[in-house]
Image (cartoon, rainbow, N blue to C red):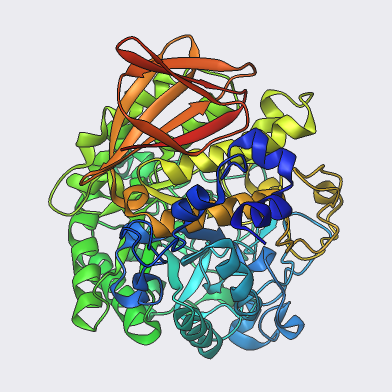
Amino acid sequence: MSVCNRTAAALGASLVLSIGLLGCQSQDAELGKLLGEQSSPDATEKQQATVPAIYQDYLNRDVRDDIFYFVLPDRFNNGNPANDNGAAPGYAKGISYGGLDVTTERGFHGGDIKGIEQKLDYLQQLGVTAIWMTPILRNKAVQKDGVAHHGYWIVDFTEIDPHFGTNDELKQLIAAAHTKGIKVFFDIITNHTADVIKFTECHNADGSFKAGNTHCEYKSLEQVAAGDKYTPFVPEREQGLKVPEWLNDPQYYHNQGDSTFRGESSLNGDFNGLDDLDTSHPQVLAGMTEIYKNLITEFKPDGFRIDTVRHVDLEFWQSFSPAIVAHAKSIGIPQFHVFGEVYDSDPKALSLYTTQGKLPSVLDFGFQRVAADIFYRGKSPVHAKALFAQDDLYQDHDSGADLLMTFLGNHDMGRSGYFINQHDAQQSDADKLKRSILSHAYMFLSRGIPVIYYGDEQGFTGDGNDIYAREDMFASQVASYNDNALLGTDKSTADDNFDTEHPIFNAIAQLSELRKRNTVMRRGEYQPRFYQQDNPVFAFARVYGDTEWLMVFNSGRQAGKISLDKADYQLISAPDGVDMNVEGQSISVQLPRLSYAILEKR
């Protein structure tokens, strides 16, 4: 079967033609060229391209060559039902036991490290080269009205949470992934630990709130200096449970009450009650650096995603990040990569942490906002031009815009499918599917490193943010998940959803293949080509050496047209109905609605 026909069989011919993914009106030879198939012994190096050897050499592969998959282990695949409730009740006073409730959004659902290992072939077929997992260190399992299915309530920084597996199982996952050329990234936390410290002014001796209190009001530095401060204590049943031992001492925490997420409280307040570490304290800096150096030494991960970066003193990152990267390199991990979560869409705020903060990279919330505005909310593409015009803000000796992690949705803000429904739930199912694939294509073809949110490749939509965007990939028993209409399939989340024939899965797999085989997609310099305020058709180039690819997108509901300076372009991927003509000193490209095309400059 030809390349073109294989693509059509996987995606459905009508879908291929409508979205422009490796369009089947192209000659098989042209498509083979695009995917790197060898057409003859005398073909050029470009035509002979195969998947580079770097995709087996995980250790030396530059992170710009990676394709990330962000996953919550608890919601992905249950490889070992015996650990579903965590540790035995008596272990460490039961702090890491319980919380299993497969019928609610908040409960543990049973997914684990072993489950991820069992699905490595699935991820490899999708094109994934790096797995980023939410935190997997041992948590306080139940806290207030929630449970730690997400892993962000850590009490022991040396041991894997028993809901997810064991230290040995994590090492086995990493070894198995590495065998397939797949990297493994840990999600880490330095801002806080689990909610263990209480205050006599608003808590009872058992840790419950005193009558009339639902939280502990934030006390400012000015109040504390004047003597108006909290008296911290740890309830008897939770004393001495944090590891390493120094974490049990309240002097290393701010103890100023709950953050309002404004002003100084953003740095010094407890994040929804979580014990906020005083990251300006030398012992906290030294202790956290030592914790994560030890984890690198023991498990040999390929990098870290750092949680709640903007809630930590900037000076902390100036020391922590270089020390962590240097340690990884010293023990033989030369491409160890660190990226932070700075929940802000303003490049000025984001770039502060990659330049002054000395983090190599951050999650590009600016990209997420712009992509959603253009492809889901119908706003002008000029927003993208304005965003990328600020890319120089990220440039310094160890960071740049090409290291930014681009994404369309996540476990906190919600899914791309949710945003599509949120803007226009009444649009046709076909259009919703096109918008999802179109936006994923934009993420793969733009500058930066693409991050797929687990389940998006199966058309998950969700009902909102946080727990409403954390569906199970295995058959779910949560009613609010199972009543959602998924994109591109008649299945629901009540079914097992590891379908390698799903149209979004196949679209991403093809984009992954394209990216791997063509350096211009991974390293090409972004250059704006065509943007107009009232035109949903826009174009940008990726330029690498003598190679230039032009990406043309139509985010509108009608066919649209753009004009460019006259140049010798050839279509290498285009939807049915694309029209390219020479008009005087320019060329025009007309695209069908909700489609994209790739052109190469000869």
Is residue 472 found left or right of 91 in the rendered image? right
Furthest-bottom residue in this view: 168
At x 73% / y 54%, what residue is drawn? Answer: 9
Quadrant housing the N terminus: bottom right
Residue 395 located left or right of residue 409:
left
Q: Nearer the viewer, residue 398 or 249?
A: 398
Residue 286 location (% of width, % of height):
23, 71
Q: Name the quadrant containing residue 114.
A: bottom right
User: Relative to 16, is 430 on the left or the right?
Assistant: right
Q: Residue at x 43, y 68 (%)?
A: 185
**Residue 280 appears in view:** yes
Q: Nearer the viewer, residue 221 or 54?
A: 54
Q: Residue at x 72, y 44 (%)?
A: 13
Identify the residue at the far left of this view. Answer: 397
- Residue 377 coordinates in the image, percent (x, y): 59, 23
x then y, percent, for residue 31: 52, 50
As drawn, is 42 to the left or to the right of 17? Answer: left
